[in-house]
Structures are given as C-alpha cells and as structure tokens.
C-alpha cells in the first residue's frame, strides 16, 4: 500500500466510525490545579560559609550521625527531608537558614 492509500483508508475509517486518528492528548482533571499542596520537600541548595553549623542543624533535623550529616551537607544540592507538612517545612527551613544554608522548599 502506498502512503496515499493509507491516508484514504484512515480518512474512510474516521468517517465510518466517527473517530479521530489524532494522538490522544492528556487533559488535566477539573479542579486539580485548585488543590493546595500539603506535602513539601526541603532541599539544601548550598551550605554557605558555616558548614559546621549546617551539619549540626542537619543532624538535629534528620537524626543522622556526624559522618552521614557531613556527607549529606557536602553533597548539596540535596534533599534533606520529604513529605513534611507546611509548618514543619517552615521550621526546618528556618533552622537551616539560621545556620547559614541556602534552602528551597517545594
């Protein structure tokens, strides 16, 4: 079959069955954009000049040991916590920023 024959066949099938051969497009559910975010992730973007203070803050927040907290801080940008509520996310962000870190909440 040639390309023209295939195009004619597709057109005939569309007319016969009342369908479209176009690729389906994803449609957002109604009202999905109106929902407020309830879970947040805290990302350590940069530890700044006070790495030791940031490591101490990370240890408080995550209950990690010294070595694990140091590795986490030095691997910035990295996620510190995930799935926390708004109040806890703000509290963690404040602690890390007070220690000298740059933090993103998403």
Image (cartoon, rainbow, N blue to C red):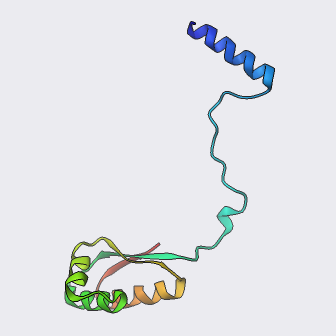
| Number of marks drawn | 0
As displayed, is residue 5 above or below residue 21? Answer: above
Location of the N terminus (image quadrant)? top right
| Residue depicted at x 64% and y 14% | 7
Q: Residue at x 40, y 89 (%)?
A: 94
Q: Quadrant of residue 75?
A: bottom left
Horizontal relation, residue 36 to residue 91: left or right: right
**Coordinates of residue 62 in the picture (x, y in percent):** 35, 86
Tell me where residue 9 appears, x and y as whole percent.
68, 13
Asked if 6 appears above or below 26 in the picture, the reply is above
Q: Quadrant of residue 66?
A: bottom left
Residue at left offset 68%, top offset 67%: 34
In the displayed structure, 11 sits above or below 32; it is above
Relative placement, left or right, of 37 versus 14 is left
Q: Where's residue 87, x and y in %? A: 52, 88
Q: Residue at x 71, y 17 (%)?
A: 11
Q: Quadrant of residue 47?
A: bottom left
Residue 69 versus residue 51: which sits nearer the camera? 69
């Amino acid at each position: 079959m040639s390309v023209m024959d295939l195009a004619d066949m597709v057109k005939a099938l569309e007319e016969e069955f009342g369908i479209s051969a176009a690729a389906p497009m994803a449609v957002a559910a109604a009202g999905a954009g109106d929902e407020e975010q309830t879970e947040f992730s805290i990302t350590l973007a940069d530890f700044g000049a006070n790495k030791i203070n940031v490591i101490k803050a990370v240890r408080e927040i995550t209950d990690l040991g010294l070595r694990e907290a140091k590795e986490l801080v030095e691997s910035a940008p990295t996620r510190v916590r995930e799935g926390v509520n708004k109040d806890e996310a703000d509290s963690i962000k404040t602690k890390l920023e007070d220690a000298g870190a740059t933090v993103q909440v998403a």
